[in-house]
Image (cartoon, coloured by chain):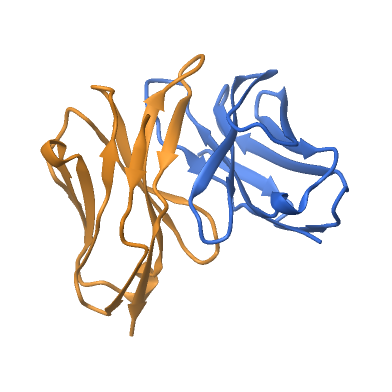
Chain colours: A orange, B blue
Amino acid sequence: AQKVTQAQTEISVVEKEDVTLDCVYETRDTTYYLFWYKQPPSGELVFLIRRNSFDEQNEISGRYSWNFQKSTSSFNFTITASQVVDSAVYFCALSEARGAGSARQLTFGSGTQLTVLP
Amino acid sequence: SQTIHQWPATLVQPVGSPLSLECTVEGTSNPNLYWYRQAAGRGLQLLFYSVGIGQISSEVPQNLSASRPQDRQFILSSKKLLLSDSGFYLCAWSGAWGVNQPQHFGDGTRLSIL
């Protein structure tokens, strides 16, 4: 069975600190996709990034960076120079292929509540 | 561009009452559609997904049902709500083209059962 573990339930940092959110996954599929979503206090989930299992190149987007390591089944997310607006719950998710058509079902981790203090 | 609308934003219902939550997508055709539930302080649980009109797959047995009467409309229903149905319900869509398109979520409905 597919599983995503976000061991950090809550993290608090002071503004401008760097913070890394951990994500460890389990899957038997050789092809899979990993995602990160942000859920601010307003509730909607915002898609941040998708990474496929064949691409281990790290990615940077502004203050966000992602470190995908297949050897340790991890897909960690780092926010550099954190800001108060980064405060949110962050979810890591894994996609699997099941059922008809091209629907891909996401297995979500339990989320990490990040609080950035001014 | 594609947009997803979900309503109502907030709903308070008594135990035993019926439920109907609606979700519509604009700007795309034949999307994959999903209903999730998020209990307070917990992760997301997939309830239903649909790859086409009238095609519904259920992930979790419960007193909820889903329907897709039109290509871009997804409805979550219940005939009799339970206290355990309280939570935050999210609708999402993904493109049916290619593989592993990211899911895009609506703003959610906060459902409280009294």
The quarter of the picture where the C terminus of chain A appears is bottom left
Percent position of residue A97, x then y: 40, 21
Residue plotted at (76% across, 54% down): B83
* Residue in the foreground of this view, choosing between A75 and A73: A73
State the residue lying farthest toward the bottom. A118
Q: Kindly identify the residue that appears in the image at 67 percent across and 37 percent down.
A: B24
Determine whether B29 is above or below B46 in the image: above
Placement of the N terminus of chain A among the 4 image quadrants: top left
Rendering coords of residue B67 (x, y %): 73, 27
- Spot occupied by residue B29 in the image (x, y as percentages of width and height): 57, 24
Q: Is residue A7 left or right of residue B112?
A: left
**x and y percent of residue A34 in the render?**
30, 38
The residue at the point 62 percent across, 36 percent down is B25
> Residue A13 or B71: which is nearer the viewer?
A13
In the picture as drawn, the residue positioned furthest to the top comes out as A100
Q: Nearer the viewer, residue A109 or A45?
A: A109
- Left or right: B83, with B49 as reference point: right
Q: Where B24 falls versus B30 (above or below)?
A: below
Q: How many numbered tags mark residues here?
A: 0
